[in-house]
Image (cartoon, rainbow, N blue to C red):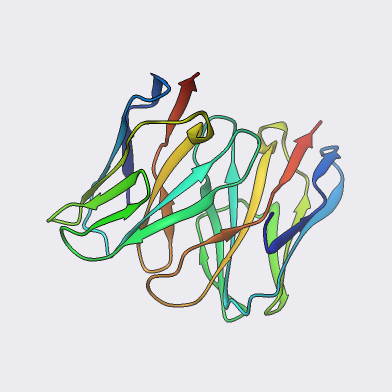
Amino acid sequence: DTEVTQTPKHLVMGMTNKKSLKCEQHMGHRAMYWYKQKAKKPPELMFVYSYEKLSINESVPSRFSPECPNSSLLNLHLHALQPEDSALYLCASGPQGPESPLHFGNGTRLTVT
Amino acid sequence: GQQVMQIPQYQHVQEGEDFTTYCNSSTTLSNIQWYKQRPGGHPVFLIQLVKSGEVKKQKRLTFQFGEAKKNSSLHITATQTTDVGTYFCAGDDFNKFYFGSGTKLNVKP
């Protein structure tokens, strides 16, 4: 079980589709993260939001567009994805500042056809 | 950017045997965290080490942070089948958590 909720659990989309991944946490954490994880690989940092502002973009292609509507919600908008973007997308949150463990959601398993 | 390597990549042990995974960073870390990811699951936080030379224990798990704060290890004593999963270290670079390559542990009953 996790206190970070991600929806949907699974998503299949075509290369011309537009879809969104959603993440919600109610732990009062002010830092939220998107990670991408390919099979048998470690999570790869994509974006970091700090106090609802984008603080880190790890050179992610523009077909991925993050959004943080408020301190509890984090979205990842997807458009014109490629098959190689198929992966597990993990959302995480953490208290701001040093010594801040990450709390992960269960992830969204994305397949791009 | 920061690179964090882990060895070994895979480890197969008999239940009851000990297990150790090592994590090495190319840069000095402000702190290091350890996570466990079960098959089909998400990473779960285990522990954080902050001080140079720090050693922490959680039941059968012992975590160490090197004196130079560039390496760390996780040791499991007397493994159990419930220890199966992939263990990741994650180096903190001003709230950018870079995960190590991971060590996948398989425990045979």
Examine the rendered structure and indicate whether residue B22 appears above or below residue A105: above
Q: Position of residue A3 (x, y in %)?
A: 68, 64
> Residue at point 66% right, 35% down?
B40
Left of B75 or right of it: where is A58? Answer: right
Q: Position of residue A89 (x, y in %)?
A: 66, 47
Return the residue nearer the eye: A104 or A53: A104
In the picture, which quadrant includes the N terminus of chain A? bottom right
- Image mark count: 0
Question: Splitting the image into 4 quarters, where does residue A12 fall?
Answer: top right
Left of B8 or right of it: where is A18? Answer: right
Q: Position of residue A68 (x, y in %)?
A: 69, 73
Left of B1 or right of it: where is A65? Answer: right
> Residue at point 32% right, 51% down?
B2
Question: Splitting the image into 4 quarters, where does residue B18 fall?
Answer: top left
Examine the rendered structure and indicate whether residue A60 appears above or below residue B19: below
Return the residue nearer the eye: B43 or A33: B43
Return the residue nearer the eye: B91 or B19: B19
Residue A49 is at least partly visible in this image? yes
Return the residue nearer the eye: B85 or B58: B58
Residue B1 is at least partly visible in this image? no
Q: Position of residue B8 (x, y in %)?
A: 33, 27
> Residue at point 31% right, 53% down?
B57
Left of A43 or right of it: where is B49? Answer: left
> Residue at point 38% right, 70% down?
A99
Examine the rendered structure and indicate whether residue B2 appears above or below residue A3: above
In the picture, which quadrant includes the C terminus of chain A? top right
Examine the rendered structure and indicate whether residue A109 appears above or below residue B104: below
